[in-house]
Amino acid sequence: MAQSLFLILGSFMLPLSMFLTLSSTHIKANPLVSEICAQTQNPSQCNQVLGSAPGASTSDLKGLGYISINIALTNAIQTSPYIASLVKHATDKMLKSRYQICVESYTSSIDALKESKKFLDNGDIPSLQTFASTAFDGPSDCDDNFEEGPPAAPPTQLNDANNKLKSLVSTLLVIGKLLEGKE
């Protein structure tokens, strides 16, 4: 009887001890991510995207800057072919022109994000902030372009892409502001 009780207790203890071991090794969130994201345009998206990025849990402010640039750059590069397809398939001249402006705006954002990395490398935070602002202007200019002349609403997917890129770049802008305060 004592032996069967031991087997029963043992069968419950093994899973319990594994659970406790796994939960104690859970990686804690980086408090810098919370501090940064609280100051962005979309804190919940920032926490989700930046907080789950590889390396973010152990990165310092500069490291989070690199991660932020890479996330925004990847997003802009992935969105560009979609916008180019809008240009290609547009039949209305004005709409085609508006989409072309968006292509150029995203190209500007991509270039600015690439340059931002160089300034972060060199510790040139004022230039980092200037180029991050330029990157932010890309999707904003795309949006504004639909307000000029006869106003028209951009396709929902383009509007969503613009909002997402602005949100991602706002993270870099906050990091730049925090890095500037540490100089």
Image (cartoon, rainbow, N blue to C red):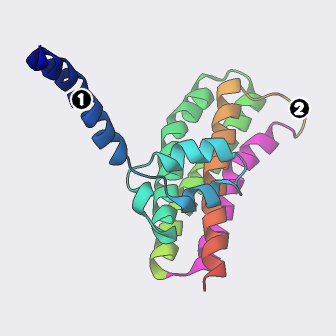
Q: Is residue 63 above or below residue 101?
A: below
In percent of the image, x 43 and y 64: which residue is there? 59
Mark 1: which amino acid?
Met
- Quadrant position of the N terminus in the picture: top left
Q: Depth check: give the residue in front, 119 or 31.
A: 31
Mark 2: which amino acid?
Pro
Give the residue pinned by disc 2: 151
In the image, is residue 117 part of the stretch drawn in magenta?
Answer: no
**Relative to 157, 22 lies left or right:** left
> Earlier along the polypeptide chain: callout 1 or callout 2?
1
In percent of the image, x 50 and y 51: which residue is there? 73
Q: CA distance from mark 1 to mark 2?
A: 67 Å
Q: Which residues are magenta?
A: 123-147
**In the image, farthest residue toward the left:** 3
Question: Residue 112, position in %: x, y?
Answer: 57, 62
Number of numbered discs present? 2
Looking at the rendered structure, the secondary structure element under dot 2 is loop
Q: Is residue 97 above or below residue 1?
A: below
In the image, is residue 124 part of the stretch drawn in magenta?
Answer: yes
**Relative to 109, 71 lies left or right:** left
Question: Residue 30, position in %: x, y?
Answer: 49, 58
- Quadrant position of the C terminus in the picture: bottom right
Residue 75 seen in the figure: yes
Looking at the rendered structure, the secondary structure element under dot 1 is helix
**Relative to 104, 29 lies left or right:** left
Give the residue pinned by disc 1: 13
Q: Depth check: give the residue in front, 122 or 109.
A: 122
